[in-house]
Image (cartoon, helix red, strand yellow):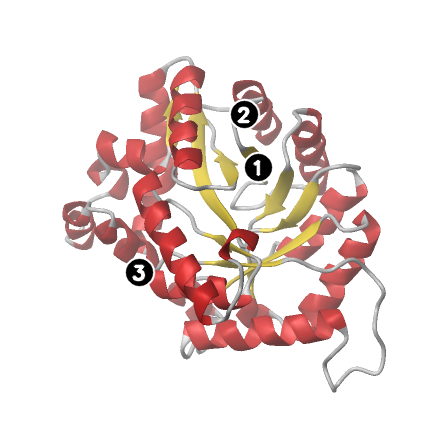
Amino acid sequence: MGKIATTSPVWGCSISDLRGLAKITEEAGFDGIFSPEVPPYNAITNAQVFAECTERINVGTWIANIYMRQPVVATATALTIQEITDGRMILGLGVSHKPVNNRYDIDMGNPIEAMRSYVGEVRAFADGTSPRLSLKRKVPDLPVHIAGLTKAAAELAGEVADGIMPYLCPPAYIATLKEHVAAGAAKAERDPSAISITNGIPSFVSDDGAAAVAAAKRGLGPYARFPFYQRLIRNIGFGDIIDQVQDGANPAEAFTDELIDSVALAGTPDHCKAKLEEHFAAGVDLAILVPGPVGKQSNIEVMEITAKAYS
């Protein structure tokens, strides 16, 4: 089996839970733990919590919204975590979603070009080459990954980033994104093998496979209301489901077993491990598992189940 990382809950959790989740992840022998970002939670400061209670695993963001902070501030904070961990920090950046950014009166402009510019500034602030700096911090190089669900985003990752962070992508689509990462790398005269292909994969594990699939439908349904994910779900062959949602259907009822089996790990431990291998076979270097509850389970219980299933 390839490298595995986990995430803290998408909708946030307590600092105590962050510490507990990170410790379980490290004890399971996984490669890292990442924090999503939904305000008022901050992915970068959550990564610092992970950093201060672990010794071996990578820590990072999955993802930090570039529109929420100046590049210099994002870089400075990430470099502090990089120093704390002696090189275990991964800065994952993304543009979030228009409905989210609209709440904060953020004009996204052209997301691809905004990300290109942002990564360039982060690089310059991190390596000390920015003409706006008067100081340079002596810390290990800071890896920068970018979120991406489209071919254009994958090409941008190949051009400017150290890795790509898609989500809800089936293995066949990951293989397509990987091709476009390579195309972007070729354009920039970079080695595509140096660019990490990650995939965020929802995980709902239970001895009751049907209950796990039902939980996945409930947990993942809200994503079908975001335009970026609507486009992704159409691109992977489930446009009829998005048509139903846009006509007013409850996503949890519109989602099919086939869609869940395509984008998530939902079922018994053996089933989930077998499905995970399909992602590695498609070219995933790091599987970022997004644990979800099946029934009434605490954040810690969900992570313990995840650790037992995949370690």
Image location of residue 171, percent across then percent down = 35, 40
Which residue carries the number 2 mark?
A: 306
| Label located before the other in sequence (1 or 2) | 1
| Label located before the other in sequence (1 or 3) | 1
Tag 1 near tag 2, CB within 8 Å = yes
Q: Is residue 300 left or right of residue 107?
A: right
Tell which of 20 and 234 is nearer to you. 234
Q: Is residue 211 placed above or below 192 in the rendered structure?
A: above
| Label located before the other in sequence (2 or 3) | 3
Q: Amino acid at mark 3?
A: Pro
At mark 3, the secondary structure is helix
Residues at marks 1 and 3, CA–CA distance in whole angstroms: 25 Å
Tell which of 16 and 184 is nearer to you. 184
Q: Is residue 86 visible?
A: yes
Image location of residue 88, percent across then percent down = 73, 48
Residues at marks 1 and 2, CA–CA distance in whole angstroms: 9 Å
Which residue carries the number 1 mark?
A: 6
- Kindly give the residue lying farthest to the top in the view shown: 207
Q: Amino acid at mark 2?
A: Thr
Image location of residue 82, percent across then percent down = 77, 55
Which numbered disc covers residue 227? 3
Question: Which corner quadrant holds the C terminus?
Answer: top right
Q: Is residue 106 placed above or below 272 in the rendered structure?
A: below
